[in-house]
Amino acid sequence: MQPENNLSNQTDDSAEETRSQEEQNSEIIQELIEKENKTYLKTILTDMHPADIAEVITRIDRDKQSFILELLKTDKVAEVLVELDTPIRKEILGDIQENRLVSIIRTMDSDDAADVIGELDATVAHNVLLAMPTKEFREVKSLLRHDEETAGGIMALEIVAVDQDQTAQQAMGVLRKKAEEVEDVYNIYVVDQQGLFKGAVSLKDLVLAKPKTKLVEIMDREHIAIRSDMDQEEVANLFLKYDLVAAPVIDVQGRLVGRITVDDVMDVFEEEASEDIAMMAGITDEEIRGQSVFRISGVRLPWLLVAFLGEIASAAVLIHFEASFEQILVAGFFIPLIMAMGGNMGIQSSTVVIRGLATGDIALRDTGKRLTHEISAAFLNGSIIVLLLIAVVAVWNHWPIFGKVMDTSAFGMIWEIPVFSIVLGIALLTVLFNAAFIGTLLPLLFKRIGVDPAIATGPFITTSNDVMGLLVYFSIVSFAINRL
Amino acid sequence: MQPENNLSNQTDDSAEETRSQEEQNSEIIQELIEKENKTYLKTILTDMHPADIAEVITRIDRDKQSFILELLKTDKVAEVLVELDTPIRKEILGDIQENRLVSIIRTMDSDDAADVIGELDATVAHNVLLAMPTKEFREVKSLLRHDEETAGGIMALEIVAVDQDQTAQQAMGVLRKKAEEVEDVYNIYVVDQQGLFKGAVSLKDLVLAKPKTKLVEIMDREHIAIRSDMDQEEVANLFLKYDLVAAPVIDVQGRLVGRITVDDVMDVFEEEASEDIAMMAGITDEEIRGQSVFRISGVRLPWLLVAFLGEIASAAVLIHFEASFEQILVAGFFIPLIMAMGGNMGIQSSTVVIRGLATGDIALRDTGKRLTHEISAAFLNGSIIVLLLIAVVAVWNHWPIFGKVMDTSAFGMIWEIPVFSIVLGIALLTVLFNAAFIGTLLPLLFKRIGVDPAIATGPFITTSNDVMGLLVYFSIVSFAINRL
């Protein structure tokens, strides 16, 4: 029941097989719960990986979740809790007795303990903290001071730190002492007597060094150290850029205070990407795993309302142009085209900028360059689209490609189809320019004022694009009616 | 000039400072290139991290890129090449002499060597392969057999493998011998005489074990091994789920063939997230870092054409309903609302499904459950939006909130505003249902037939949503006109 030793997934079919292994697990467990076969359940659960138990818990009913956790040992419960997603964990934490909670949290790494305590009700958190031994109380307290989304918020305090005057052999001694507390050791960190970070020695270099070698001789003095107030997205990009597995965290004075490991960084990666994707689509990230329809509806509604209000404004724009609308009904037929092309162009530009900002490939100082790029691309593709549009409209009434001809009689003799298609083309090109311009500038503007640029795509940008696009379109059409 | 030791980024301002450090680097280097001050340039470049040199290369002009690479030593060029993005690397590879290319590639890890050779022109790749020593030739050849997007495609062949009968001390001997070849060692892999993977010993456990301890006694028998044909996205999800730093790769028979390290997995993460985001927005991933406006336009055009053709179909739908359109012009004013609300609802549903499929939180067998969820949420939010719409339309003509009243005179006495708003509401609700249904089902369908589900959002889904939405809307309005 451990994670299978041999995992393969060449095709979707085999992906389904792997999945159904997990499904089978949760089915068997469901059955055992109903039969109240605690002995067999305990045996199965003891052999399972905490991440797998967490997955089963996510899939079973609310009332059976506590039943399973009660069968587990304290340290296993701690491991499972760490693997759970925040919304489900919050629910489960509410069910656990305070004194059991204290023992569970005490077995956790400092960073996980701080995360869990941060999710408790204020009074429960207070009681749990008071019930902890002084050392752990201080550790968790010091971690809770950091903003959740910074390096300090994701670091753990468990590190192997050795004084710079010591030898490889002495460092091995420290490692031996710390072995139980620090689960995964990749580097030994070297500090001076003030606790200032001086460098790192990889475990490999340490074991291959001669016992009497001084650490200063083998340490990497250029090893990256991360300031505790660095944003977690920046941290993730540093790990990606320099291929890090772990990095020491230092405070403002340069003192070694903790360590970030790559597993936490991967969580940040997934979190940030999901957050961006969610925001682009007008949903929230947590929702993907959420359970209740009411909650799903609740978090989506605000985005829909933004779009709703924007499109009511669109209706107002159209009503404002009612006279032109009646004169040239055919202009109405191309509302969807104008809206959709502007929307797509805007999203293309804004997404490139947003993703570029997130991965660090685009910086605020690139604004001018980016604008030139996007406007040029809009001009190129816009021209192609407009030429195509003129061609489509031109042949439409010669060979009614969609069964019916377009009624352009309102234009009189001078407003034949070709003239109309040219007016339409000019309007479309203007809308596309506008969309590329807004789509590029808005995320950069949001970034500058400290708002997550990802919000500048999705309902927010498409809706404002719609209103502006229709305004531009009908202004040009009305102008043309009055002059031509 | 190394990556700065203390990196901090609490505010956007300090982010700008860090960035401008890099910018300064590339400015200084640009200047030195123009002054042809090779000596100073060499000194600077020798001290820089390959990832930083790669960043500078990405920012400078094409003709100066080769100039810089010529100043670097072979192994440094190799490191820089590995850090570059594929499109830029491809360009640069074309400039390098074949015999220099061979020496550069020989210093690379097997997985990077295979990647680079895979990017060369077929004839150059052939020549380079032939010029390599037999052992390396075989290694790269064996790696090139794997699909790029599988575990085999991202694994490296450099591993420390030890026979299961050996002791901790003997394993340390093997590690010492392999130390130069295998850069980062986290685990020693244990195999039997047939080369079958048996388990893993973490470096920490190895160094803390007594010298005479047999590996079988301290090895983790349940350590995850990944089949070489597993999809890289699945691999990434496994690393995330089980917090892995490295994992052994095995072939169909269970023989140890290589190892995947977390730095490559992070690249996969970024790649897959960027790919999904790009596809949602109708752009391509590479484009974000791309340089040429023509290339940008070229990759975006197909998506715009999809939208263009779809919206031409929308125009045809509207022309088909021309009669109703003329009778109730006011129906036209709400085209943007119908389109936008349907579009947003569809994207919300499809994004949840697509992201869920990517992270493994949603599986094909969840189809029914997911549909129920999405339809229920559409019903809830749809009802709220429709009630709001009816309210807005009702008050509109009492107090012309947008300056003008809506002209519903075409309806006659029985088609007063309230009646119209109810017809509009029914149409909107139908469109929303349809959007949620298609938005949920399409990605799952794509997944089943083996197409990347991420394509089911973005221009593809919004455009089909527009056409269907307008068809539904005007069918209902026409029906109402004829019956009421």
Image (cartoon, coloured by chain):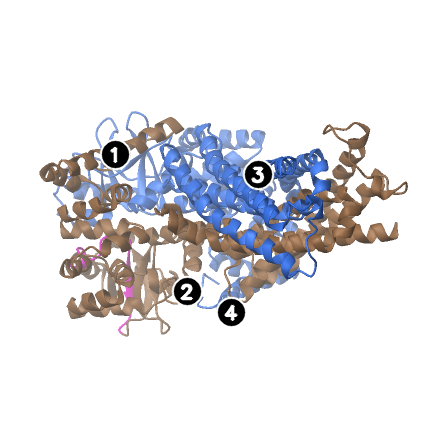
Chain colours: A blue, B brown
Residue A77 location in percent, x, y? 51, 48
User: Which numbered marker is on residue A465?
Assistant: 3
Instruction: Give the amino acid type for the residue marked by disc 4 in the picture.
Output: Asp
In the rendered view, tell whether residue A454 sits above or below residue B113.
above
Residue A88 appears anywhere in the view = no
Q: Residue furthest right?
A: B413
In the rendered view, tell whether residue A276 sits above or below residue B396.
below
Numbered disc in front, either 3 or 1: 3
- Disc nearer the start of the sequence (4/3): 4
Magenta segment includes B149: no
Q: How many marks?
A: 4
Instruction: Give the amino acid type for the residue marked by disc 2 in the picture.
Output: Met
User: Which numbered marker is on residue B4?
Assistant: 1
Distance from label 4 to label 3 (Cα)?
Answer: 42 Å
Mark 3 surroundings within 10 Å by alpha-carbon count, few (fewer than 14), some (14 through 19), many (20 or more): many
Distance from label 2 to label 4 (Cα)?
Answer: 12 Å
Instruction: Give the amino acid type for the residue marked by disc 3 in the picture.
Output: Asn
**Horizontal relation, residue A299 to residue B254: left or right:** right
Residue B123 location in percent, x, y? 23, 68
Residue range corresponding to the magenta coloring: B177-193
